[in-house]
Image (tube, rainbow, N blue to C red):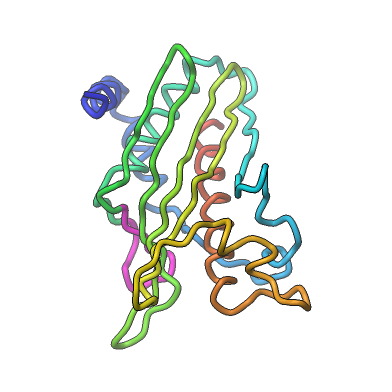
Amino acid sequence: MKKYIIAALIMALPLGMVQAQRGLISTKKLYTQKADMSEYAAKGAVPMVNGKVVFTKEIQAFARPKDYIYTQMASFASLRFEANTRRGDWKEPNFFKNIDFARVTKADKEEGVIVAQGAEEMIFSNRALSQDYTQVFYTLTMTISDGKVDLRMDNISFIYEGSSDKTRLTAEEWITDEEALNKKGALRRINGKFRVKTIDLFNELADEIEEMLK
């Protein structure tokens, strides 16, 4: 039922708005690794709240009323978390594909809250006969009020295709300072690439939302 409610909401939006949103997502470069790796290796780059990995950001939308922001965010969430949606080129590290678990799980206009279940592939590298990637799962919560969106990403976990047993790994046991940084403060080889991609994932989601609210 919730899926049909979201679909009805999107159908009610102006066509130009939906097309613009789809274009923004489809052309956005995701998970672009910065040249300066020190940002990823900095202590606290993966923030912890009560022992859990929790990324947060307050995104300003000055002079925008709550109803307008909610409509924009409902459009964004419905398109960004549509299952089985391919963006970009699978040969490129920036490629991702939403898998079947991706969906909007809550959309309450009166409360001003939209919650999405992220479930997608993140590519580490491509070679002639192999592809190194992981499946990442997370919860993205958008709390909307007049003039702003409070963004939160938590409940992050991974199923690593490079592992023989496909064990699910939580962010808390895999990308924190204690797990992803060595004694010299540098990124570990395996854990580090997960940390880099996860930080980039949150930053790109925030960038896309900021762009929608300009």
In the picture, which quadrant includes the N terminus?
Answer: top left
Predominant secondary structure, magenta span: loop
Q: Is residue 31 left or right of residue 61?
A: left
Q: Residue at x 33, y 56 (%)?
A: 87
- Is 96 part of what is drawn in magenta? yes
In the picture, which quadrant includes the C terminus?
Answer: top right
Q: Give the answer, above or below, for where 118 lies relative to 71.
A: below
Q: Give the answer, above or below, for where 76 lies relative to 83.
A: above
Depth order, front residue of 211/167: 167
Q: Is residue 72 left or right of residue 152?
A: left
Identify the residue at the far top of this view.
110
Q: Position of residue 90 (x, y in %)?
A: 31, 68
Q: Position of residue 91 (x, y in %)?
A: 34, 73
Identify the residue at the far bottom of this view.
128
Residue 185 position by quadrant: bottom right
Q: Position of residue 51 (x, y in %)?
A: 65, 48
Q: Residue at x 31, y 23 (%)?
A: 14
Q: Residue at x 65, y 71 (%)?
A: 35
Q: Position of residue 80 (x, y in %)?
A: 37, 43
Q: Which residues are magenta?
A: 87-98
